[in-house]
């Protein structure tokens, strides 16, 4: 099912919702379509609107401050665009830069996406001990960046230019 990015009235990313929920918010005049999937439309007896990819709420919603994006295996793969941090091929696993056997934790700055071959070759060693070089350094995305990365990674359609992704992730 398609996901739609929800922006606050101030254009701050809030969350993603299902296509059905996004259409309901637009029909109820609680949101406007900021960016739509090209060539796709939702049609019903009294409704004909573009399939929303990004919607913006008409009224500002106060949200509790979110300091950090929650870490997850899927989040690391999405952050690294499913590319191995060691060779650049398709990544299917995550690797701990400082292995858990040496006290490494499940954190944004200690995990990278890796292909199974490089993950196995590195084993329970650091990249320096294994003679391997990281192609890009791990970073901690902001909560808003994590939403944008997740949306951009699951859809083949490009996000609008004004909705920029983090610099470190687009490399």
Image (cartoon, grey):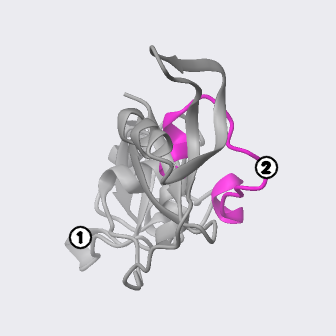
In the rendering, which numbered label is found on residue 100? 1
Residue 61: image x %, image y %? 45, 73
Question: Which of disc 1 and disc 2 is earlier in sequence?
Answer: 1
Corner quadrant of residue 73: bottom left
Compared across the picture, whether 95 is left or right of 109 comes to: left
In the rendering, which numbered label is found on residue 161? 2
Compared across the picture, whether 54 is left or right of 70 comes to: right
Q: Quadrant of the N terminus?
A: top left
Give the foreground label among 2 and 1. 2
In the rendering, which numbered label is found on residue 138? none
Residue 97: image x %, image y %? 41, 67
Residue 141: image x %, image y %? 51, 69
Q: Is residue 107 above or below residue 86?
A: below
Residue stretch rendered in magenta on the structure: 149-171
Between residues 28 and 32, which one lies in front from this camera angle? 28
Q: Residue furthest front?
A: 46
The magenta stretch spans residue 32: no
């Amino acid at each position: 099912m398609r996901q739609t990015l929800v922006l606050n009235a101030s254009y701050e990313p809030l969350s993603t919702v299902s296509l059905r929920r996004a259409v309901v918010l637009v029909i109820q005049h609680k949101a406007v379509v900021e960016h739509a999937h090209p060539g796709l439309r939702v049609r019903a007896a009294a409704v004909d609107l573009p399939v929303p990819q990004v919607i913006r709420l008409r009224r500002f919603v106060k949200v509790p401050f979110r300091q950090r994006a929650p870490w997850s295996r899927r989040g690391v793969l999405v952050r690294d665009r499913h590319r191995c941090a060691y060779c650049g091929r398709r990544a299917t696993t995550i690797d701990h830069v400082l292995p858990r056997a040496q006290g490494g934790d499940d954190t944004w700055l200690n995990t990278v996406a890796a292909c199974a071959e490089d993950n196995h070759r590195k084993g329970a060693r650091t990249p320096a001990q294994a003679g391997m070089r990281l192609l890009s350094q791990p970073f901690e995305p902001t909560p808003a960046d994590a939403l944008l990365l997740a949306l951009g990674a699951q859809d083949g359609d490009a996000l609008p230019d004004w909705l920029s992704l983090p610099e470190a992730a687009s490399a």
